[in-house]
């Protein structure tokens, strides 16, 4: 059995990954070796078989024993360990949730229901680096990948509504704490049905604006009852307004760069890249990323054909009828959280013309957005 090193297994993404690996009985096919950055020598989780002690995640010799390493420990860990491990001659497979290596020429962004041919091609050429995609991009392609596969997309514009979990566990806590603080501020007024709503509103805004540096330590500004239209770094720093990427967030850049790389198209792949751009916005949802999409199609395709294409693309996509009732029941983060389902709804032709298509899609950013593509890549390697 392949000796499989697991790093980052107790973090938020790692815990979701472990749950899915248990559900899918992945541990029956591997000999796991659990690593820790903080508790080497401690007891490994119950999934351990022969190796029941946690190894030091910075111990290159211990890592070198593994045929496969799966890490959800984060980008700093990857930066610190991966180059040393390869420099030490390790030839195993590296499966990683972090973005650090994603755009490297020798790395494939894995999302097998969408890009199995790209993965297989890289495997045949000796590929060894398999990196999970950005959560927003992976969830989007699980929903509407069919339109790309059919070569129908001339360009796509995205408007995202991204959950707190994208920032990490502390961000989710901060959001909920802010909601609690705001509720507490106006609780007596809420309990009194005769109180004036504008007074409640005034007090909420005053409290939001008065949130301390500690109360906004992770997002930097209030998110509860608000939104933040910028995610990740500023790619335009130091550029003038007419240069590429001026005013673009890194999360927005990933939409185009990663979508095309996942599909095996773009500058270094022969097939021209499809322009993808838009705005990425943090909202007060817990762990589901939602996005409104506008496509310019290469030709006018009947709506029924488009719906059939989307619905038939993979086992997890679910076409939600474009009705009010179905939308408010099935196309929300509350409906989708913790499930593998990728609903796509609000599919309709837009007022700009018959080649302009709108859609709205949602995905659990810890499942299809992070953990699931990694465990599926592990199974692909085990079955290769
Ligand atoms: N959050 C997200 O939505 C996404 C994250 N990713 C990637 O995955 C990486 C990991 O993210 P995430 O899982 O959110 O990170 P976490 O902060 O939840 O976990 C990372 C590590 O922190 C250590 N840790 C310290 N204290 C605790 C604690 N109280 N509970 C659990 N773990 C603790 C653990 O390492 P140890 O056991 O060694 O101490 C753990 O593996 C990210 O850096 C990113 O690269 C990718 C896609 C989406
Ligand atoms: N940046 C994403 C989460 C994430 O971890 O993305 P990436 O894997 O591309 O760094 C978000 O905040 O929602």
Image: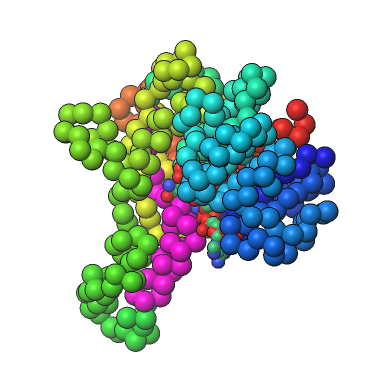
Can residue 188 be spotted in the picture? yes
Q: Quadrant of ligand 1?
A: bottom right
At x 62%, y 25%, the residue is: 127
The quarter of the picture where residue 171 lies is bottom left
Q: On the rendered structure, is 116 left or right of 135?
A: right
State yes or no: residue 297 in magenta. Answer: no
- Residue 147 appears anywhere in the view: no
Residue at left offset 74%, top offset 59%: 53
- Give the quadrant of the N terminus: top right
Q: Residue 274's x, y, as percent? A: 40, 22
Rendered location of residue 222, percent (x, y): 31, 64
Principal secondary structure, stretch drawn in magenta: helix
Residue 232 pos. (x, y %)? 36, 47
Of the 4 image quadrants, the one containing the C terminus is top right
| First to last magenta residue range | 156-182
The colouring scheme, among rainbow, by chain, secondary structure or one colour, is rainbow
- Image mark count: 0
What residue appears at the point 54 percent right and 26 percent down from the top-left corner? 106
- Measuring from the top left, give residue 225's x and y in whole percent: 33, 64
């Amino acid at each position: 059995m392949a000796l499989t090193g697991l790093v980052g297994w107790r973090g938020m993404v790692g815990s979701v990954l472990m749950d899915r690996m248990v559900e899918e009985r992945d541990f029956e096919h591997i000999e796991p070796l659990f690593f820790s950055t903080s508790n080497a020598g401690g007891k490994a989780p119950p999934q351990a078989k022969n190796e029941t002690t946690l190894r030091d995640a910075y111990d290159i010799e211990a890592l070198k024993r593994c045929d496969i390493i799966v890490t959800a420990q984060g980008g700093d860990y990857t930066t610190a360990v991966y180059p040393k491990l390869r420099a030490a001659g390790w030839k195993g497979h590296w499966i990683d949730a972090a973005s650090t290596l994603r755009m490297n020429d020798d790395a494939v962004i894995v999302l097998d229901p969408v890009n199995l041919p790209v993965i297989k091609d890289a495997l045949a050429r000796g590929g060894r680096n398999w990196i999970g995609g950005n959560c927003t991009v992976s969830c989007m392609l699980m929903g509407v990948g069919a339109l790309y596969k059919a070569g129908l997309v001339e360009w796509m514009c995205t408007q995202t509504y991204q959950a707190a979990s994208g920032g990490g566990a502390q961000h989710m806590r901060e959001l909920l704490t802010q909601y609690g603080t705001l509720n507490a501020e106006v609780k007596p007024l809420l309990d009194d049905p005769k109180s004036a709503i504008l007074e409640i509103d005034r007090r909420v805004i005053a409290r939001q604006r008065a949130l301390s540096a500690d109360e906004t330590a992770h997002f930097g500004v209030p998110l509860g009852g608000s939104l933040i239209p910028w995610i990740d770094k500023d790619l335009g720093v130091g550029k003038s307004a007419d240069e590429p990427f001026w005013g673009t967030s890194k999360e927005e850049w990933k939409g185009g760069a990663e979508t095309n790389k996942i599909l095996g198209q773009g500058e270094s792949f022969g097939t021209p890249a499809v322009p993808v751009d838009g705005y990425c916005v943090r909202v007060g949802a817990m762990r589901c990323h939602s996005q409104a999409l506008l496509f310019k199609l290469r030709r006018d395709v009947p709506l029924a054909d488009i719906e059939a294409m989307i619905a038939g693309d993979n086992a997890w996509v679910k076409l939600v009828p474009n009705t009010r009732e179905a939308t408010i029941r099935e196309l929300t983060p509350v409906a989708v959280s913790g499930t593998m389902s990728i609903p796509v709804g609000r599919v309709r032709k837009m007022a700009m013309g018959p080649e302009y298509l709108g859609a709205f899609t949602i995905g659990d950013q810890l499942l299809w957005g992070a953990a699931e593509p990694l465990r599926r890549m592990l199974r692909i390697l085990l079955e290769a």
